[in-house]
């Protein structure tokens, strides 16, 4: 009788371990899928942020160039005006 009880206990223990391993594998698989999804989403968001920043930098550069051109033009006009005033 003791041998049958021992075999039954070992069988229950083995099935419990197998069930736990199967559940663990399932959880691990779900976790890996979620990790991959999160990484893909983060990568997509990072690319969008970088693209937006590059576009903003390009707009800022164009705006700066336009302001510089305007300042140069204003300086030349002011210089010309002062030069004409001095010569007159």
Image (spheres, helix red, strand yellow):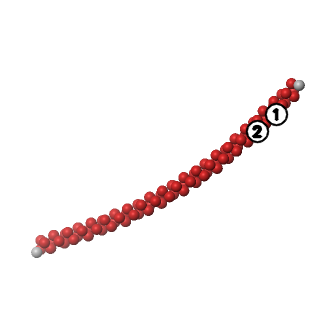
Q: Residues within 10 Å of mark 2 (few under 14, many from 20)?
A: few
Secondary structure under tag 2 reads helix
Q: Residue furthest bottom?
A: 88
Q: Position of residue 58 (x, y in %)?
A: 41, 63
Residue at which label 2 appears: 18
61 or 2, which lies in front?
A: 2
Q: Which mark is residue 82?
A: none
Q: Residue at x 50, y 58 (%)?
A: 48
Q: Quadrant of the C terminus?
A: bottom left
Residue at which label 1 appears: 11
Q: CA distance from mark 1 to mark 2?
A: 10 Å
62 or 27, which lies in front?
A: 27
Q: Residue furthest left?
A: 88
Q: Position of residue 37 (x, y in %)?
A: 60, 52
Question: Which badge, 1 or 2, is on the more N-terminal residue?
Answer: 1
* Vertical order, 50 against 17 (above or below): below
Q: Residue at x 73, y 40 (%)?
A: 21
Q: Position of residue 87 (x, y in %)?
A: 12, 74
Q: Residue at x 17, y 71 (%)?
A: 81
Q: Is residue 50 left or right of residue 39?
A: left
Q: Is residue 10 left or right of residue 78?
A: right
């Amino acid at each position: 009788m003791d041998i049958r009880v021992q075999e039954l206990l070992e069988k229950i223990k083995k099935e419990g371990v197998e069930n736990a391993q199967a559940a663990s594998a399932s959880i691990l698989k779900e976790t890996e899928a979620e990790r991959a999804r999160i990484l893909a989403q983060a990568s997509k968001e990072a690319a969008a942020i970088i693209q937006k920043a590059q576009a903003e930098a390009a707009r800022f550069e164009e705006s700066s160039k336009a302001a510089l051109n305007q300042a140069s033009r204003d300086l030349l006009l002011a210089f010309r005006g002062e030069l004409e005033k001095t010569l007159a």
